[in-house]
Image: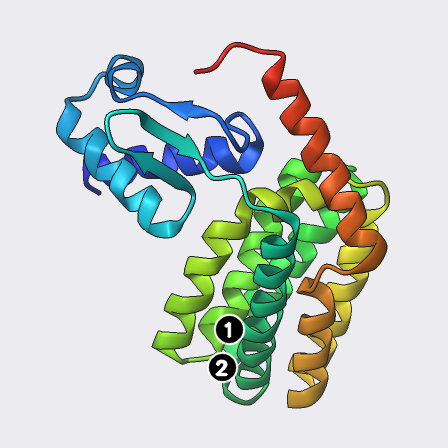
Amino acid sequence: MKISDTLREKIEEQIATGALPPGSSLDEATLVEQYGVSRTPVREALIQLATEGLIEIRPRRGALVTSIGPARLSEMFEVMGELEAMCGRLAARRMTDAERKALHAAHEACEAARAQDDPDAYFYCNEQFHSAIYAGSHNGFLIEQVSQLQRRLRPYRRLQLRVRNRMGISFQEHQSVVQAISAGDTEGAAHALRSHVVVQGERFADLLASLNALTSQTQNTSPM
């Protein structure tokens, strides 16, 4: 893996975990010193992150972690719900036996993380769960599109899991997805995934409240 790709993944992870919340500054010189690399891979990593929409590069002013407004965030989750529904519909038809086993294994890993009340572990298991569904669609272009938006929404999907009872509800929704895909129920899988991903009503209000709290914490600390 290229140095720039490794660096991009590390920064992505910091954004997803909230270590770099929306509005955080990313300075080239600081990143060079922090990771012990030259400016070239740092610039390449920042360009990749900007392409994904995770940061905004401002000429002569450095880069900032993107802050998405409530209306835009709602629209993005709406599109994500439709993309995942399409993946689920195709996966219910096209998944191989080995891919179904991988989905069940990811589902069981989510159950273990939920039982331990570990939202961070659940987040990673959840990513494996959804990735198994993407792969099961056997549609390369769809996988590219849904993966790109998934990376953009990664910090916000992680925040959701910190809302009270969300892990348990998420696992129950996963169960419906697994049952539909295993039964070859294309429309059931699509409906279950759409409902699981789209954030509306109280869930959206809870997400915004968590995001506002995280942003407030950032404003009270020194930038990177």
Q: Position of residue 14 (x, y in %)?
A: 48, 30
Q: Which colouring convention does the figure follow?
A: rainbow
- Camera-side residue of 102 and 145: 145
Q: CA distance from mark 1 to mark 2?
A: 5 Å
Q: Quadrant of residue 55?
A: top left
> In the image, what residue occupies the spot 53% across and 25% down?
19
Q: Nearer the viewer, residue 31 or 76?
A: 76
In the picture of the structure, the residue carrying the numbered disc 2 is 96
Residue 7 higher or lower than 34, as above or below: below
Point 40% across, 48% down: residue: 53
Residue where numbered disc 1 is placed? 99
In the picture, measured across the screen, residue 56 lies left or right of residue 89, that is left
Q: Tags 1 and 2 in contact by the CB under 8 Å rule?
A: yes
Q: Nearer the viewer, residue 223 or 180?
A: 223
For the question of whether residue 181 can be seen, the reply is: yes
Which is more toward the observer, 159 or 139?
159
The spot of residue 75 in percent (x, y) is 60, 63
The tag on residue 178 is none
* Label 1 crowd bin: few (<14), some (14–19), many (20+), radius 10 Å: some
Q: Residue at x 26, y 22 (%)?
A: 28
Element carrying mark 2: loop
Task: Identify which amino acid the numbered label 2 is placed on.
Answer: Thr
Q: What residue type is disc 1 on?
A: Glu
Classed neighbour count for the residue bearing mark 2: other residues with Cα under 10 Å, few (<14), some (14–19), many (≥20): few
Residue 118 visible to an observer of this rendering? no
Q: Position of residue 54 (x, y in %)?
A: 43, 43
**Residue beneath the point at 77% across and 37% down:** 209
